Amino acid sequence: MQKAVLKLYHIPFWLAYHYLWWVVAMGNPFKAAESILFSPFAIKFLFYVVLQAVAVYFNLYYLIPRYLEKGKYKPYIGYLGITLLATSLAIVSGYYVSAWLAHQSVETLFGRDKNCFFYFFGETMPSTLASTTLAMSIKLTKNWISTERRKQLLEKEKLETELRFLKYQFNPHFLFNSINSIFFLIHKNPDVASASLAKFSELLRHHLYECNDELVPLEKEIAYLRNFIALEILRQNRGILVTTDIDELPTDTDIAPFILMTFVENAFKHVSKDSDRDNWISIRLRVKADHLQFEVSNSTSALSTQQALHYGGIGLKNVRRRLDLIYPDKHFLEIQDGDGAFAVKLSVALEPQNTHLDSPLMVQ
């Protein structure tokens, strides 16, 4: 449950909201203010303000994230109905408390002859429903504006990211080295050459056709990642020990494209190239309870570390920004540099397939 904190500026908002209701009911703003401040009706007013605020925040910060955002419409409607009913009944008790403190009967204080309870409930239920609807409208409007702003930033970041990856991966150096390596293997090991050419083809296809959406299937993104790793090992041919440990992946989850790629690319670009010790890259991926846990580490030297900080900083800054935009409050990123190794640990809450990030309810 998201932490619900009543901000200070919310207090005068609720006071003003309920005061306006009293003005409409009484037809006189001065009479309404006098009734609230200098009469037994002040207790009833407080019951309205406090209990409806509690119902509103319970709906916004518990029911909506827990049920409505996850598509559990029937439980949401049921629990919302219970909340409205319980709040209305609790506010009705404020009428009786007001009469008790005024040492009068509810019939006398509120000018009713009989059926007081049903009359009071007929006032509290529509009022509670109205305040809940108003709060949801304000929240959803605010989220819609925030979502539109976030979509614009995402489009800009996505274009910059695609251009950066295309510039690095599809520059002539990368293309010619990969093609030359495959050409060399045609005579030496035709089977490996054929497999490498297939990986190269899949890499191109992913870039050109499959990564244009805001989210892509996780299994396709990982398949792309495997192809890139295989081609990098083939292309570089520098005696670097590369170990991958990728768990079995779910087939019903999506992820933003190129999020994982940045860290793998960074590892290959800045791995140590020392001749007197082992040079290595380790890649590990797990999916547990709809959370992706991704770890990439590589050996470093003084030169490679300096290059990583100087040249790789843009890429790392870029992916941090994309994570903040695409997965706000739904990811954890830790980067460690020291003891001859550069390590990245990333945890991301995966999105179920067919879930759209542009829904206003997804932004909090």
Image (cartoon, rainbow, N blue to C red):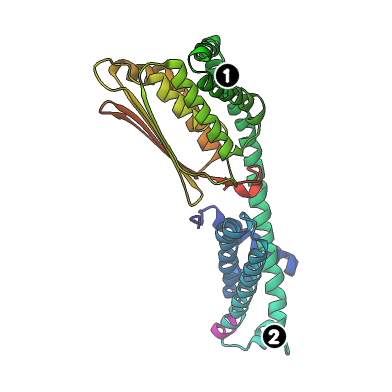
Q: Which residue is mark 1?
A: 166
Q: Which amino acid type is shown beneath numbered disc 1?
A: Leu
Q: Which residue is mark 2?
A: 116
Residue 82 in the image, given as x and y percentages of width and height: 63, 72
234 over 137 or under it: above or below: above
Majority secondary structure of magenta residues: helix
In the visual, does 189 lie left or right of 34? left
Few, some or many residues within 10 Å of mark 2 (<14, 14–19, 20+):
some
Q: Which residues are magenta?
A: 98-102
- SS for tag 2? helix
At 55% from the left and 30% from the top, the residue drawn is 224
In the visual, does 33 lie left or right of 290? right
Rounded to the nearest angstrom, the CA distance separating label 1 from label 2 is 73 Å
The quadrant holding residue 29 is bottom right
Residue 92 in the image, given as x and y percentages of width and height: 63, 78
Q: Which mark is residue 63?
A: none
At 63% from the left and 35% from the top, the residue drawn is 214
Residue 204 visible in the displayed image: yes
In the visual, does 244 lie left or right of 224? left
Q: Which amino acid type is shown beneath numbered disc 2?
A: Cys
At 58% from the left and 72% from the top, the residue drawn is 47
Return the residue nearer the eye: 210 or 133. 210
Residue 285 in the image, given as x and y percentages of width and height: 44, 39
